[in-house]
Image (cartoon, rainbow, N blue to C red):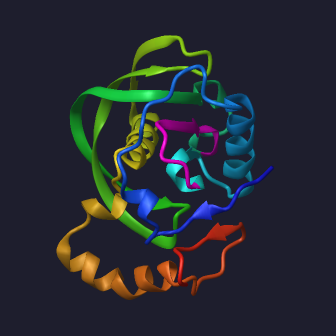
Amino acid sequence: MSLPIVSYGSAVLRKKCENIDENYPQLEKLLENMWKTMYNSSGVGLAAPQINLSISVFIIDTKPFIEEGDEDNSIKKVFINASIIQEEGDEWSFNEGCLSIPDIREEVKRKSVITIKYQDENFKWRIETFKGITARVIQHEYDHIQGKLFIDYVSPLRKRMIKRKLENISKGKIEVGYRMKFPKGN
């Protein structure tokens, strides 16, 4: 089932998420719904706070960013209880967007290489290093479970320039091609 995406202005997007264990109820069904929601929204990543759950779970599938013929280099993964343990390499800028903040894209600088410790969908601990666009997608989704949004990285001037758009998103004054859930009272 495709779930509604929580919009900018919702408190859950600003909370640091709680870790879960293998007893989390219906995790397999939740992950299935997260994949459907992400694909139906044309996303490359989705974190649990974006579907109104304050738990440390996110998914990514970088295939849309991979050049034709190079699909074997795409990554499709589940990250549970993740912790970025190292960020290194040159910072590089990329025009990021977010399903919870539709119609806003901003240049964000991030490190090019990350090492992350996480549990997979079977709760097996892994430590892996990722680079390039995959590292960026992971950093973006990891920020969600830390209560951060990509707009937190833009300059104060840019924030003032997009303030009205952000207010409209939080008030539900936006049309998108997927279901959204707006803060109460809007």
Can residue 161 be seen in this snapshot? Answer: yes
**Residue 175 in the image, given as x and y percentages of width and height:** 65, 81
Q: For the C terminus, which image quadrant?
A: bottom right
Say whether residue 114 is left or right of residue 88: right
- The front one of 50 and 158 is 50
Does 58 lie within the magenta span? yes
Residue in the image at 40% along x and 26% along y: 130
Q: Which residues are magenta?
A: 52-64
Q: Is residue 96 visible?
A: no
Question: Relative to residue 67, is residue 96 depicted above or below?
Answer: below
Residue 41 left/right relative to 168: right
Q: How many numbered marks have been drawn onto this rendered protein structure?
A: 0
Using the image, determine if residue 106 lies above or below residue 47.
below
Q: Where is residue 52? Give x, y as percent.
A: 56, 55
The vertical placement of 120 against 107, above or below, is above
Work out whether 103 lies above or below 107: below
Out of 23 and 103, give the one closest to the viewer: 23
Q: Residue furthest right?
A: 1
Residue at 44% of width from left, 40% of height from top?
133
Name the residue: 26% across, 83% down: 160
In the rendered structure, does residue 92 fall within the stretch colored magenta? no
Q: In which quadrant of the rendered view does residue 127 lie?
A: top left
67 left or right, relative to 113: right
At x 58%, y 19%, the residue is: 22
Q: Is residue 177 left or right of residue 152?
A: right
Which of the two residues, 11 or 128, is positioned nearer the viewer here?
Answer: 11
